[in-house]
Amino acid sequence: MHLRLNHAPGRLPGPGATLIGLILLICLAWLAAVYQQLSRENMALQQQWQTRLSLVAENQPAANKPPIDQALAADIAEAQRQIQTPWLTLLTDLEHAQQAQLYWLQLSPDAKRKQIRMTVLAQQRQQGWALVDRLKKQPALTDVKLKASEATEVNGLRMTTLHVEAGWQF
């Protein structure tokens, strides 16, 4: 009984593949060195730019500065207040109070007064009152009030429209 092994001996890469690999390795090292040099030069240029900006600001007399438009400044302050309002937290709290058979018709937030007005459509009046109770239990909402409640007919169904106001604390 003879045992025959059908085994092919391993082969090392040829000289062409080895040469290409070495060339690529040398290019990679060269590119890394160039990147580091450019990074250092960029940092130096940024420091020079900041230095020049500060010198220009110090040397510019106050009389040459343009007058600030008060309306524009107020609009910018309002935009910053709107951006800084944590809308996601507020909307998450409203979603936690949501239940089936309630339909949000309108949400009107006012970032300046930190208030939100809501119009909700409920199939039953008790569902609307339960919503107000759940809104009062939300940690971010304060001073939740049912402002008005009225019976409405929607597509032949008797519904209740609720107008609710709440403040928020952030």
Image: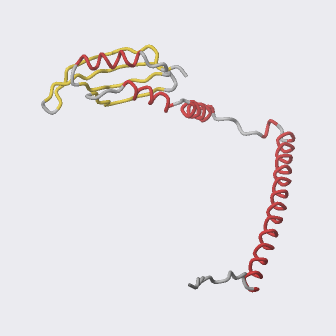
* Viewer-proximal residue among 50 and 127: 127
- The image quarter containing residue 5 is bottom right
Quarter in which the N terminus is drawn: bottom right
Q: Residue at x 67, y 35 (%)?
A: 68
Residue at 50% across, 29% down: 89
Against 2, residue 125 (above or below) is above
Q: Quadrant of residue 157?
A: top left
> Which part of the image, by quadrant, shows the C terminus?
top right
- The mark tally for this picture is 0
Q: Nearer the viewer, residue 14 or 51?
A: 14
- Please report the residue visible at 25 percent of the width from the left and 23 percent of the height from the top: 161
Note whether 21 is above or below 76 in the view shown. below
Q: Is residue 92 left or right of residue 123?
A: right
- Residue farthest along the left direction in this orientation: 156
x and y percentages locating residue 87 in the rendered image: 49, 31
Give coordinates of residue 99: x percent, y percent: 31, 27
Residue 8 at x, y = what percent? 63, 83
Q: Where 88 falls versus 117 (above or below)? A: below
Asked if 134 appears above or below 55 in the picture, the reply is above
Side of 149 where 95 appears, left or right: right
The colouring scheme, among rainbow, by chain, secondary structure or one colour, is secondary structure
* Residue 76 x/y as whole percent: 60, 35
| Left or right: 156 in relation to 37 | left
Taking the spot 38% from the left edge, 29% from the top edge, the residue there is 107
